[in-house]
Amino acid sequence: MLDSLVTSKTRVKLLLKFFSHANSGYLRSLAKEFDESTNSVRVELNRLTDAGLLVSTDEGKTKIYKANQSHPFFAEIKGMVSKFLGLDDLLEKVVKRMGNVEKAIITGDYANGIDSGVIEMTLIGREIDQQYLNFLIEKTYEKINRKVKVTILETESAEVQGILVYGK
């Protein structure tokens, strides 16, 4: 959906990076992460900054970019990116229908704003319906072509630190 509205693949990658989580980045690291030339990333960073969707700050000789949270379309773009990734629907279903789920936490690459094709999730709770979870994992793959890896914990450990947390 998002890639049919936005024709530049580099721009789509930047939107996913900055609007899926509170991420920031600089030119060379983004070019390396996306396996793109610095020039193509620079052009899209400039376009998104000129449109007011990104803001930049200077840290020494490095210019750091991040999403402009005060932009009038910030919430809408963030919602589109979330729907594109399918995370909002998946997490809502998990928290509501899986049993006694206290939290659902996105970890791994997606928590860092990287679309690796694998969504890693940690569920914290008891008596989680494993059969329904397996069904949701299959449907998610069919719908958005992303694998889902789930870790289930009965209690939250100090090591679990997610960016996206849904639940009580």
Image (cartoon, rainbow, N blue to C red):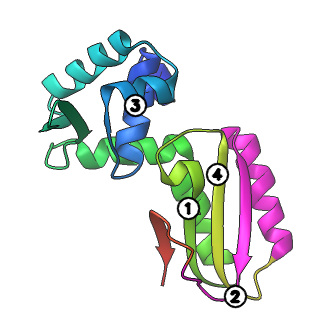
Pointers 3 and 1 in contact (C-beta within 8 Å) = no
Residue that mark 2 sits on: 154
Mark 1–mark 2 Cα distance, whole angstroms, equals 16 Å
Query: Given contact means CB atoms under 8 Å apart, are the residues at marks 1 and 4 in contact?
Result: yes
For marks 3 and 1, give the one nearer the viewer. 3
Residue that label 4 marks: 119
The kind of residue tagged 3 is: Ser
Q: Position of residue 138 (x, y in %)?
A: 80, 52
**Amino acid type assigned to the residue bearing label 1 in the image:** Ile
Label 3 crowding class (10 Å Cα cut-off): few <14, some 14-19, many 20+?
few
Q: Separation of disc 3 and disc 1 at Cα?
A: 23 Å
Q: CA distance from mark 3 to mark 2?
A: 37 Å
For the residues labelled 3 and 2, say whether their Cβ atoms are less than 8 Å apart: no
Residue at 49 percent of width and 46 percent of height = 83
Q: Tell me which segment is drawn in magenta.
A: 130-158
Identity of the amino acid at label 2?
Glu
What distance separates the C-alpha of mark 1 from that of mark 4? 7 Å
**Disc 2 versus disc 4: distance between alpha carbons?**
20 Å
Q: In the rendering, at what x and y percent does residue 122 appear?
A: 64, 69
